[in-house]
Amino acid sequence: MRLLRLCHAEAVLHLHRQRRYAFEFVASSLILLAAFAGLAYGLGWLPDADFLPGQSSLALGFVLWSFASAAYSGIAGETADEIRGRTLERLCTVGQPLHVLLIVRCSLQVAGALLGTLVLLHVAFWIVGRSVEVPVGPLIVILLLAAPSLVGLGLFMSGLSVLFKQAESVNALMLIGVIALVSLPAYPGNVLALLPFSHAAAWIIAEQGSLSLAGQLPRLLFVAGNSSLYITIGLAMFGVCHRAARRRGTLGHS
């Protein structure tokens, strides 16, 4: 019951934040779309080459990167904001473990990012002059199964932020790494598929219009297992760093 009340309170807070920072969200979204449009049209002027992505793959990759960044930053960004505001220690008084609160907040952001992905999918394909042929149902299922691996990365980064406070350089490197995870050739299967989210992203981009879950149970189980592995590692890392910060007495420092 307490967890349900926490989820309700955080949902109300999340909606309040979305209304409060709506201008920033719209402005940043337009800037990203303008940058993507410039990239898409710039690549369109280049001669065809095997190493260049097609317009549809470029649009889909942009959509997947947007979702992956939101899933990772949903928890890593929340922790960094609380540390900068010197409010992290107060979160320990809500009656739930700190990592539970952060995961609830991240889940709300992932849900919002998933809805935004469906809109962005049509906008990105419209920019490149292609029709959307990616089946929405399989796309949502795969993204939901793969998202916890990115949450695990966010928990890992959150643990470092809690312990060391100033970890912006590592966080910037992780954001660049998210771009790499979306673009890695991890399909149909190789060692790169062991990295978080990489196999799911490569699967979606490779199949696109023919994306289907029929007969793909082993692949779905692999994506789910990959997510379980990384969120377990993230939780363990966060727990270690959180306990270390409490022993040092620096949990509320910035």
Image (spheres, rainbow, N blue to C red):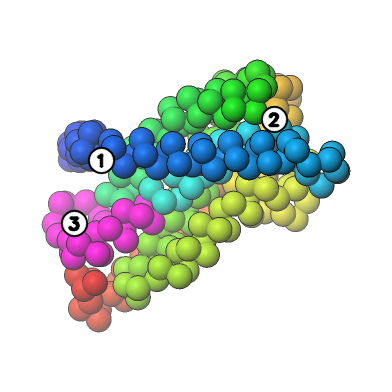
Distance between mark 2 and mark 3 Cα atoms: 43 Å
Q: Which residue is mark 2?
A: 56
Q: Mark 2 is on which residue type?
A: Ser
Label 3 and label 1: CA atoms lie apart by 22 Å
Question: Relative to the observer, which residue lies in front, 99 or 18?
Answer: 18
The x, y position of residue 23, in whole percent, is: 29, 37
Quick check: 34 above or below 94? Answer: above
The magenta span reads 75-98
Question: Which residue is located at x 46 percent, y 50 percent?
Answer: 72
Q: Where 217 falls versus 38 (above or below)?
A: above
SS of the residue at dot 1?
loop
Q: Which residue corresponds to the image point at 59% horizontal and 51% vertical from the top-left?
A: 179
User: Residue 13 or 151: which is nearer the viewer?
Assistant: 13
Vertical relation: 44 (above or below) 158: above
Residue picked out by circle 1: 21
Badge 3 marks a residue whose secondary structure is: helix
Q: Identify the residue under disc 3.
A: 91
Disc 2 or disc 3, which is closer to the eye? 2
Secondary structure under the numbered disc 2 in the rendered image: helix
Judge whether residue 90 is colored magenta: yes
Residue 94 placement, left or right of 132? left
The three-letter amino acid code for the residue at tag 3 is Leu
Question: Is there CB contact under 8 Å for labels 3 and 1?
Answer: no
